[in-house]
Amino acid sequence: MNCEKITYYIEKGYLTELNLSEKMQIRLHRFICKGCRNYESDSATLNQILELLDKETNQKPTFTLEEKEEIKKALKAL
């Protein structure tokens, strides 16, 4: 399993319930990949911050197209 697929599953897990196979793939990959362990931790922190922001402002944060592209470039550089 590659890191791209694992990060996809990690993010998917915030939106829907993962099946047993997906959960196991994440666990096994995390065991050998420090980068994905760090990604999961950072992603969880970011999601918590966004949830708090949502509760405080009662609105979802939005990004411009330019901001989205910058985020994509930064993630690819990792």
Image (cartoon, grey):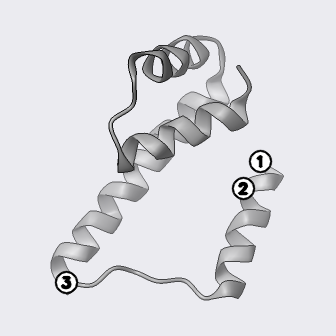
Residues under labels 1 and 3: Cα distance? 32 Å
Q: Which mark is residue 75?
A: 2
Q: Which mark is residue 58?
A: 3
Residue 78 horizontal/vertical position (percent): 77, 47
Left or right, 74 with reference to 7? right
Residue 36 horizontal/vertical position (percent): 61, 31
> Disc 2 or disc 3, which is closer to the eye?
3
Q: Residue shown at 82%/54% (left/top)?
A: 77
Q: Nearer the viewer, residue 24 or 73?
A: 24
Specify the amino acid type for callout 2: Leu
> Disc 1 or disc 3, which is closer to the eye?
3
Residue 4 horizontal/vertical position (percent): 71, 37
Label 2 crowd bin: few (<14), some (14–19), many (20+), radius 10 Å? few
Q: Residue shown at 17%/74% (left/top)?
A: 55
First in sequence, mark 2 or 3: give its number: 3
2 and 3 marks in contact (CB < 8 Å): no
2 and 1 marks in contact (CB < 8 Å): yes
Q: Which mark is residue 78?
A: 1
The answer to whether residue 25 is above or below residue 45 is: above
